[in-house]
Image (spheres, rainbow, N blue to C red):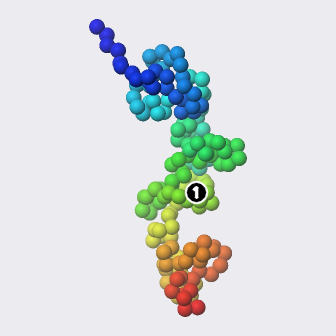
Amino acid sequence: MKTQKLRCRACFTPTCSVCRKQAHGLNSGQLPSTRAALEDFVCPACPQEKFTCSVCEKEKSRNDFSKSALKHIKTRKLRCRACDTPPCKVCHEQVHGLKTSQLPSTRAELMEFVCDTCPQNDLTCSNCRIAKSKHDFSQTQWSKRKTQRLLCKVCCRTS
């Protein structure tokens, strides 16, 4: 005797994760069988598109990109979720909350990415000539480090 899987009402009319419409009239092979499959369900009417990340250059599915990235696909570079939180090559931590200008924009930059808190990213104070980390400089000094002399917090107070 063949047994049938019991499904709740939500599984019989799953909501598409792409178009947000409920899918009706699906056969049992098209219905999601797990909670994860229900959350990632894409209806047969929606195309199963693949997108290429402009940074890592890998072809990935729609779920690998944020909704915002896909919404602005025609006006911005398409960056996958992994490239939005790049791993530091020194401490191997995922770096979150970076501005677009701080993110790596090529595959080479992604491989060489170093976060602001790592010792390899230390800079030397223009006054005392001591290598210091980001935390030893004021936010203003740190943000302008590429365009003007860099002074640590101690030297700023004595100047």
Residue type, mark 1 in image: Pro
Q: Secondary structure at mark 1?
A: loop
Picture quadrant where residue 18 is located:
top right
Counting the numbered discs, the total is 1
Q: Residue furthest right?
A: 75
- Which residue corresponds to the image point at 52% horizontal and 16% vertical from the top-left? 25
Where is residue 55 drawn, in percent x and y?
A: 59, 50
Query: Depth check: 108 or 76 in front?
Result: 76
- Which residue corresponds to the image point at 65% horizontal and 48% vertical from the top-left? 77
Q: Residue furthest top?
A: 1
Q: Is residue 48 above or below residue 74?
A: above
Where is residue 75 drawn, in percent x and y?
A: 71, 47
> What residue did someone put label 1 on?
104
Q: Quadrant of the C terminus?
A: bottom right
Query: Depth check: 118 or 27 in front?
Result: 27
- Which residue corresponds to the image point at 62% horizontal and 81% vertical from the top-left? 149
Task: Judge from the rendering whether residue 124 lies leftward or rightward of residue 37; answer left or right.
Answer: right
Where is residue 33 drawn, in percent x and y?
A: 40, 25
Where is residue 56 drawn, in percent x and y?
A: 56, 48
